[in-house]
Amino acid sequence: MIAFLRPVHRQIMLAVALAAVAASAFLLDWGWLPRYLPLIAQGVWTTLWLTVVTMSLGMVLAIGLGFAQAAGPMWLAWPARVYCTIIRGTPLLLQLWLLYFGLGAFFPQFPELRQSFLWPILREAWPYAVLALTLSAAGYEGEVMRGAFRGVPHGQIEAARAMGMPRFTLFRRIWLPQALHRALPTIAGETVLQMKSTPLVATITVLDIYSVARRVTQDTFIVYEPLVLLAIVYIIIAGLIVLFFRKLEARLPARMA
């Protein structure tokens, strides 16, 4: 932590942040905060798990999409490229609404589905939020992984093939680790962007931290303080994401060796 704060600009940023927090604590009205603490905790938890789950699932899909574009046959590369183009070319809010209002209106037409064990889940809003955020992350990260896979030195791949290394072992021990290492800084930034995209789920009634801030404003007519709290929460989560990926970057080369 001391090494992280060693650069002067980070010390200045920390001082400014602490001064802003202190001024907010003493100059603003926080009398409403104890009443809404349970909702705030629930909203923060929703934001966290949405970010972690959708980025994890999205990365699994992105590895396949990226590898298909970088080294797959044409019948796999073109569908992967079309998918990434569509996802990157349409707004996430549109994708979310298409899934929620599209599939959400389509499923109830099947009585068998409404009587199945899946219906209590499908009638909720959060599965559509998870699906939309996951597909969006996969589309963006698929392009990142495509470049990362192509950036792995081709000579290493040819040398491993010449030694008779099986394809899956080649992918697991050489291609994938080096591609992930190259893509990690970009993935860190995309994870922060994914976290900042989670407020869109409020449009389909999922209760995240943004929804809580909006509810506080509607109930109390207090506007500024909930927004300040919202900004502080997002900054803290973004900082934790950055620290996590920096530690991961430092450890990954040792694992590759």
Image (cartoon, grey):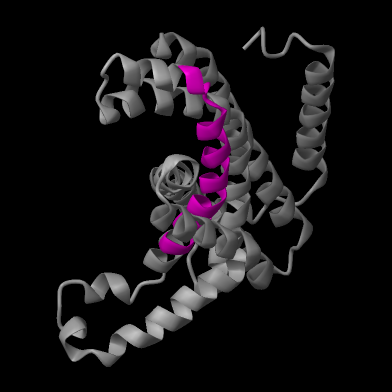
Nearer to us in this view, 131 or 118: 131
Residue 11 drawn at (x, y percent):
80, 17
Any magenta on residue 198? no
Residue at (31%, 83%) from the top-left corner? 107
Of residues 102 and 78, the one drawn nearer to the viewer in this rendering: 78
251 relative to 140 in the view: left or right: left
> Is residue 226 found left or right of 34 in the rendered image?
right
Q: Nearer the viewer, residue 75 or 128?
A: 75
Residue 21: quarter of image: top right
Rendered image quadrant of residue 56:
top left
**Residue 199 locus on image (x, y percent):** 60, 60
Q: Which percent across, then down, holds residue 8?
A: 84, 13
**Residue 135: percent from the left, percent from the top?**
46, 58
Does residue 52 sit above or below 14 in this rendering? below
Visible residue check, residue 130 = yes
Q: Residue furthest front?
A: 162
User: In the rendered image, is residue 248 in sight?
Assistant: no
Q: How many numbered marks appear?
A: 0
Q: Is residue 17 above or below residue 246?
A: below
Residue drawn at x 77%, y 23% is 14
Residue in view at x 83 percent, y 44 percent: 27
Within the magenta stretch, is there residue 139? Answer: yes
Q: Which span is picked out in magenta?
A: 131-155
Q: Which SS type dominates the magenta stretch?
A: helix
Above-or-below relation of 162 to 33: above
Q: Quadrant of the C terminus?
A: top left
The quadrant of the picture occupied by the N terminus is top right
> Is 162 left, or right, of 83 in this rendering?
left
The residue positioned 69% from the left and 55% from the top of the image is 226
